[in-house]
Image (cartoon, rainbow, N blue to C red):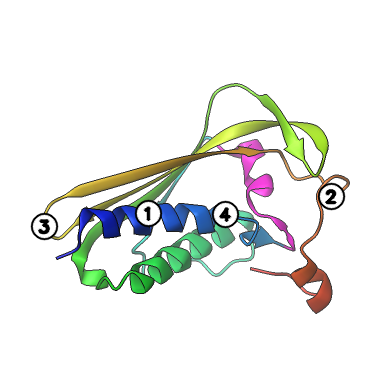
C-alpha cells in the first residue's frame, strides 16, 4: 500500500518537474505559449492515448502524462494503485508583473493542481502557483538543448 508521504512526494516532484524549464516548446518555456488563451486545462494523467500533434496544448498534455508516469515509477508505485489522476492548469484572475531573464514583464499567476485517487479510496492533492508571461522571444532565452540540436524540443 502506498504511503501518504510517497504519494505527496510523487505529486510534488511531478509539479516541480512539469513546471520547470525542461518543459519546453521549440526550445522556449512551454507555458508562455499557453497563458494568453488559458482559462482552464484539465489533463488526465493516466491517459493511454494522447494527441501527437505539434501544438503547445498537445505538448503540454504529452509532457504531463509522461512526467507523471515517470514520477510514479521512480517512487516504486504500481500504476494500478492509482485509480484517477488529474492535472488542472488554471490562470488566476488579474495580471501581475514578474521577472523574465532580468526583465519585468506582464503575465499571470498560474495554478498547477495535481490530484490523485488511490486504490484504497484516499485522495491527495498538491498545488503549485507559478508566474508565467506570454512567450516573447526578445526576452526569453532559447534552451541550449534546442540550439545545440537545431530542432524542436518536446
Highlighted magenta segment, given as a residue range:
26-38
Binning the other alpha carbons within 10 Å of mark 4 as few (below 14), some (14 to 19) or many (20 upward) gives some
Mark with earlier residue (3, 2): 3
Alpha carbons under labels 4 and 3: distance apart: 32 Å
Rounded to the nearest angstrom, the CA distance separating label 1 from label 3 is 17 Å
Looking at the rendered structure, which numbered label has been put on residue 120? 3
Whichever of labels 4 and 1 marks the residue nearer the N terminus, that label is: 1
**Residue pictured at 85% horizontal, 45% vertical:** 139
User: Position of 76 compared to 143: left or right?
Assistant: left
Indicate yes or no whether the magenta region holds residue 35: yes
What is the CA distance from the residue labelled 4 to the residue labelled 1? 21 Å
Secondary structure at numbered mark 3: loop
- Residue 151 position within the rendered picture, expressed as x and y whole percent measured from the top left: 78, 74
Residue where numbered disc 4 is placed: 57
Give the foreground label among 2 and 4.
2
Closer to the eye: label 4 or 1: 1
Secondary structure beneath label 2: loop
Residue with the most extreme left position: 120
Q: Which residue is mark 2?
A: 137
Q: How many C-alpha atoms fall within 10 Å of the one at disc 2: few (<14), some, or many (≥20)?
A: few
Q: Earlier in the sequence, mark 1 or mark 3?
A: 1
N-term mark: 4 or 3: 4
Amino acid at each position: 500500500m502506498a504511503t501518504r508521504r510517497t504519494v505527496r512526494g510523487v505529486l510534488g516532484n511531478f509539479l516541480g518537474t512539469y513546471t520547470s524549464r525542461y518543459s519546453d516548446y521549440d526550445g522556449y518555456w512551454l507555458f508562455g505559449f499557453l497563458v494568453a488563451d488559458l482559462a482552464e486545462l484539465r489533463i488526465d494523467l493516466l491517459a493511454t492515448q494522447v494527441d501527437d500533434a505539434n501544438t503547445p496544448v498537445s505538448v503540454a498534455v504529452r509532457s504531463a502524462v509522461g512526467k507523471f508516469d515517470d514520477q510514479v515509477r521512480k517512487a516504486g508505485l504500481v500504476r494500478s494503485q492509482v485509480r484517477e489522476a488529474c492535472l488542472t492548469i488554471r490562470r488566476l484572475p488579474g495580471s501581475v508583473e514578474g521577472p523574465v531573464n532580468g526583465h519585468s514583464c506582464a503575465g499571470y499567476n498560474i495554478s498547477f493542481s495535481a490530484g490523485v485517487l488511490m486504490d484504497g479510496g484516499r485522495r491527495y492533492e498538491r498545488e503549485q502557483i507559478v508566474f508565467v508571461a506570454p512567450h516573447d522571444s526578445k526576452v526569453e532565452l532559447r534552451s541550449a538543448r534546442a540550439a545545440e540540436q537545431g530542432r524542436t524540443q518536446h
